[in-house]
Structures are given as C-alpha cells and as structure tokens.
Amino acid sequence: MTSTLPQSPTAVWKSRLLNWSLTVASVCGCLFLLPVRVPGMELLGVTPNWLLIWVVAWSVKRSAFQGAVAGLVLGLLQDAMTADFPTHTLGLVIVGVLTGQLQKQRFIQEDIVSVALIVFGMAVIAETAMAVQISLHRLFQPDSLFPALSEIWLYHQRISLSSAILSSVWAPALYYPLNRWWQAHGLPDAG
C-alpha cells in the first residue's frame, strides 16, 4: 500500500512548469522537423506531417474542444512558417475535433497501432481540407495560379496517400514518448 505525500505549492508549480515546457518543446521540435528533408523520410516529395501527428497525440486523451484549440494554435504556427493560403489551420482543427470525439465515443483503444490508424485517416482528412480550399479558390477565381480542378484532385490523391503513409509510420515515434511523459507526470491540462 503506497501513500502519496501532499506536495508543496512550489513542487506542484515546478511540475506543471516542467510539463508545459516539455509540451512546448515538443511542438517546437515538430515545427523544426517540418521543412527537413531526410533521405528515407520522404515519399513522392512529401514528408511526415509532424504537427498533425502532434495534434492527434494531444487530442486522443482530451476533449474535442481541447483538440480544436491545439489544431488552431499549431495550424496558425504552420501558416506562419509557410503561406496563409490555403490554411493548414482548418485541417488541423478538424483533426483535433474528430480525434477528441473518437475518444469521447470510446471508438478507439489507446495503443500505438490505433494511433497510427487514426493518424492515417486524419492525414487524408487534413489534405482533403487543403484540396477543397484550393478547389474553391479556383472555382471563384478562374484566373488564379492554381491548376485546373482535375489536376488539383489528381495531385491530392498522391499527396494525401503519401502524407498518410509517412505520418502513420512515424506517429509512434512522437506519440509514445509524449504519451508516456504525460501519463507519468500528469497531463499538462490536469488541474
């Protein structure tokens, strides 16, 4: 029988600061990995969507609202690194909400294989959100620089499948350590 000793307010504050520091550091690591092209980590010119993997890892044990907020923040950060159109924010918010809903509905188990499958599906959804934005822009501005609709959707198939495959393969590399940390040291949002 183990008993837990009450922690001092300073120890609680330090623990929370450490949890949030690791969480922010993992987001920064994902941001730095986005533009990196490592041999063997690229398929048809596409690399893993590290921010999508992070949003899934965060949202799998949290509410849909918390997932949406994570998707919003990481989407805005990714848009700041790239271009603001088409926005990555829409796809990442959808991913956060859907992943949070999956957990709420108890459709998933919390293991690495389930997370990899979720990442696969969510990568396709996020890439589809990008393709829809580009298609709508092309429809309402025919003189835009984007290609024809048929080319957009043909390109979308290649991008979404490549992104889904790579992101799901690399998902455990990010999910496992973050999940272990949050389990051992308390979730950053826990009270």
Image (tube, helix red, strand yellow):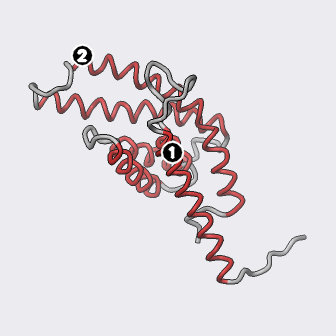
Secondary structure of the residue carrying numbered label 1 = helix
Q: Please report contact status of discs 2 and 1: CB closer than 8 Å, yes or no.
A: no
Residue 131 drawn at (x, y percent): 30, 29
Looking at the image, residue 22 lies above or below residue 100: below
Q: Quadrant of residue 152?
A: top left
Residue 69 drawn at (x, y percent): 41, 56
Residue 116 drawn at (x, y percent): 59, 34
User: Residues under labels 2 and 1: Cα distance?
Assistant: 32 Å
In the picture, which quadrant includes the C terminus?
bottom right
Residue 108 drawn at (x, y percent): 60, 41
Q: Residue at x 17, y 32 (%)?
A: 137
Looking at the image, residue 160 lies above or below residue 51: above
Looking at the image, residue 101 lies above or below residue 187: above
Query: How many neighbours does mark 1 have within 10 angstroms: few (below 14), some (14-19), or many (20 or more)?
Result: some
Q: Residue at x 40, y 19 (%)?
A: 158
Tag shown at residue 30: 1
Horizontal relation, residue 51 to residue 179: left or right: left
- Name which residue type carries label 1: Cys
Q: Residue at x 28, y 41 (%)?
A: 83
Tag shown at residue 91: none
Horizontal relation, residue 19 to residue 145: left or right: right
Secondary structure of the residue carrying numbered label 2 = helix
In the picture, which quadrant includes the N terminus?
bottom right
Front disc: 2 or 1: 1
- Name which residue type carries label 2: Ser
Looking at the image, residue 126 lies above or below residue 64: above
Query: How many neighbours does mark 2 have within 10 angstroms: few (below 14), some (14-19), or many (20 or more)?
Result: few
Residue carrying label 2: 150
For this orientation, the residue located farthest to the right is 1
Q: Residue at x 50, y 32 (%)?
A: 48
Which one is earlier in the sequence, the residue at label 2 or at label 1?
1
Horizontal relation, residue 1 to residue 14: left or right: right
